[in-house]
Image (spheres, rainbow, N blue to C red):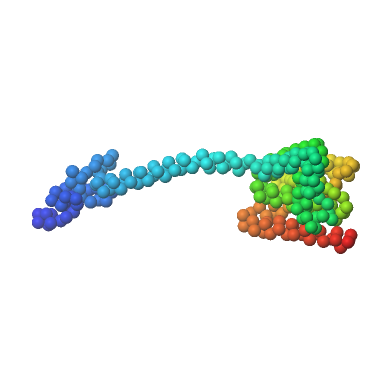
């Protein structure tokens, strides 16, 4: 290269000061920079434009980091709530509230119970009774035993199934208890959450068997409750058996449709169970009408 070629080559001059010769390149953009434009780094030097760009990237990363740190407590709080059986506690709270409401004297409490308990002839014009039967309890021991069982099983089942599946299991089991009562004992009024609780017990037994857990204690508990249901006075064993059978069926559905790709199938199967139970209510009309 001749001296003229060197002097006319712009790569030999600072890109910001074209009249200043230099042989130093910016380590990022590889453009020639003069001493005034050089900012020393641990390795090489950098030009003002690349320095500004680098600082902008660092500021953006710092903002993202601060935003991430700010969100972390919320995610941790959400993660803590994910393991809390909120539906179980809510059901216990609502059921207890209606029990206390039923204790109000002056006929109001009795009116509330009469409006919510299940009685087959009224269920066709007042269908809410099929489920609100779970909110009516006739004594302190009645509600204490049912809520204790709900608390004990809900703490294990709800985190395992998820809140909406657990709620669907509870409601459909209650519906199953009411439907079997309508089929077998249509003239008997029924109160209590025993059908729904038996549904939880049946589902826990089936799911436990499916995942290989030791279900001996659950089987013994089912057997004892079954004996008490038939031996005890004023116990609606039809609601117990109906709830337990439906709970076992739903437990089987949950166990066989655990994959994400089967979620839609699971929902439709639960809908089919609900529709099938409601369809069975036509049988008492045909038999006892």
* Number of numbered labels in the structure image: 0
Residue placed furthest toward the bottom: 286
Q: Quadrant of residue 151?
A: top right
Q: Is residue 185 left or right of residue 197?
A: right
Q: Is residue 194 in view?
A: no
Placement of 197 over or under 279, stated as above or below: above
Q: Quadrant where the C terminus lies?
A: bottom right
Residue 232 pos. (x, y %): 88, 41
Residue 64 pos. (x, y %): 42, 45
Q: Residue at x 85, y 46 (%)?
A: 236
Q: Quadrant of residue 108?
A: top right
Placement of 40 over or under 7, stated as above or below: above
- Viewer-closest of 198 and 17: 198
Residue 101 pos. (x, y %): 75, 41
- Viewer-closest of 23 and 161: 161
Q: Residue at x 85, y 61 (%)?
A: 285
- Viewer-closest of 95 and 275: 95
Q: Residue at x 13, y 54 (%)?
A: 6
Residue 261 pos. (x, y %): 62, 57
Q: Is residue 125 in view?
A: yes
Q: Quadrant where the N terminus lies?
A: bottom left
- Viewer-closest of 216 and 240: 240
Q: Residue at x 27, y 40 (%)?
A: 41
């Amino acid at each position: 290269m001749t001296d003229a070629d060197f002097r006319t080559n712009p790569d030999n001059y600072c890109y910001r000061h074209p009249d200043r010769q230099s042989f130093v390149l910016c380590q990022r953009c590889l453009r020639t920079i003069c001493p005034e434009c050089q900012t020393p780094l641990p390795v090489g030097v950098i030009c003002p434009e690349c320095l500004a760009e680098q600082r902008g990237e660092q500021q953006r990363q710092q903002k993202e980091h601060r935003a991430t740190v700010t969100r972390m407590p919320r995610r941790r709080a959400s993660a803590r709530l994910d393991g809390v059986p909120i539906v179980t506690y809510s059901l216990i709270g609502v059921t207890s509230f209606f029990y206390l409401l039923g204790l109000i004297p002056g006929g109001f409490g009795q009116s509330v119970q009469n409006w919510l308990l299940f009685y087959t002839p009224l269920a066709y014009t007042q269908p809410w009774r099929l489920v609100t039967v779970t909110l009516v309890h006739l004594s302190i021991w009645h509600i204490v035993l049912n809520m204790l069982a709900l608390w004990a099983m809900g703490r294990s089942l709800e985190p395992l199934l998820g809140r909406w599946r657990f709620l669907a299991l509870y409601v459909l089991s209650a519906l199953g208890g009411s439907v079997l009562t309508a089929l077998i004992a249509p003239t008997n009024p029924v109160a209590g959450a025993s059908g729904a609780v038996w549904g939880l017990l049946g589902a826990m037994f089936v799911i436990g068997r499916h995942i290989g857990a030791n279900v001996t204690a659950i089987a013994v508990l089912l057997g004892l409750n079954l004996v008490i249901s038939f031996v005890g006075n004023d116990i609606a064993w039809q609601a117990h058996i109906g709830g337990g059978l439906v709970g076992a069926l739903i437990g089987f559905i949950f166990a066989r449709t655990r994959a994400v790709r089967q979620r839609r199938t699971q929902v439709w199967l639960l809908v089919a169970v609900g529709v099938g139970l409601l369809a069975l209510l036509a049988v008492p009309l045909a038999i006892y009408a």
